[in-house]
Image (cartoon, rainbow, N blue to C red):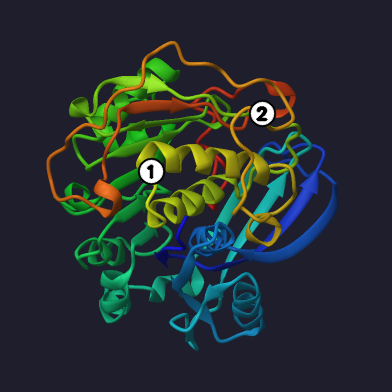
Amino acid sequence: MRNGQVVVVGSANWDRTVVAGRLPLPGETVLGRSVQAGAGGKGANQAVAAARAGARCRLVATVGDDTEGRELRRRLDEAGVDTDVVRSDPARPTGAALVTVDDGGENTIVVVPGANAATDATAVRAAAPLLRGADVVVAQAEIPAAAIEEAVLAGARLFVLNLAPYTPLARGALERVDVLVVNATEAGQVLGAQPPAGVAEALAAADRLAGLARSAVITLGGLGAVVSAGPQGGGARHVPAPRPARVVDTTGAGDAFVGVLAARLAAGEDLPQAVSAGVRAATLSVATPGAASSYPDFTALPEPGSEPGSEPESSSESSPQPGQHGGPRGAGGLPQGAARHVPAAAAAGGSPRPPHEAGRRTGGAHA
């Protein structure tokens, strides 16, 4: 498998994570057991995940001209992310994320964008040659909407948009997106409907999303991920994937999924293969606390069914032939394959969370 080039356009934050026995209720104070700080932000997390999956990864982002920004840049460099085009903004502090994690691995997150607001349309336009030269470009919605729209227009070979948190975009922008990645809550917001409740509804929602973008992935927390290349992709099926042996912290699992997905697409894998790899990476990531700073080596993921934990679900449907879909092709002929359900990391104790609860993250929790 070749090492493809991934460019991530997105946020970079300095995370502060508190571990407590349970999450506080509104107006309540609880005592925490520990606090740690490290690299975070959806853009930085996904860049680190892509790099640890073997991709040559560059990050287009902005940090403050402060201690946190310098330390964040240093840690990204150590993780193998090229930060040559990460800018420093003297007028704004480095973005911050305040994370609380409970004993079950569930989390709440508040993000203060700070210097991420400077990753605007002008900054993305200046980086356009990098985007056009990459195998895969990834963006998320912790930067201004105009920057996302500019990235979509840059002419990338393959564009992956993780529309998290949900942000309305200009009409027609989604039509240029090769792979749209959302959780169940965000899927409902894009479609103007209730979040899909269960795999069957998620499969239908993914097909609808694939009518807006060129293909779509809906992540469902403990229930996995659904991927669709639209009705012409051959119908819906689900592919087995493991559950984790333990759940410590889900904060960065969704970003591990997206980063590894991008790395595998850049390496030439098709969309269902890349989704399967992303699910396995997300499963590994929940076993350790934190996000980017705790990601393991994703270059040699366990094969489905070989990990400790419960047996994967099996599919009773036949494998479809790669289908055709309107619009330009991306790298590896994307999108191809049918809509698929990929069971992913379950909640602690093996009980999947309902999809409407799986959307409880802003800075990268697995959804």
Q: Position of residue 130 (x, y in %)?
A: 32, 76
Picture layout, residue 139 above or below residue 321: below
- Residue depicted at 75% across the width and 41% down the height: 248
> In the picture provided, is 171 more to the left or to the right than 32?
left
**Mark 2 element type:** loop
**Mark 1 element type:** strand
Kindly tell me whether residue 9 is visible in this rendering.
Answer: no
* Mark 1 surroundings: few (<14), some (14-19) or many (≥20) residues within 10 A: many
Of the pair 50 and 212, the residue shown nearer to us: 50
Q: Amino acid at mark 2?
A: Ala
Of the pair 255 and 326, the residue shown nearer to us: 326
Q: Amino acid at mark 1?
A: Val
Counting residues from the N terminus, which is met first, the one under dot 2 or under dot 1?
1
Of the pair 12 and 296, the residue shown nearer to us: 296
Kindly tell me whether residue 251 is visible in this rendering.
Answer: yes
When asked about the image quadrant of residue 66, the answer is bottom right
Residue marked by disc 1: 181
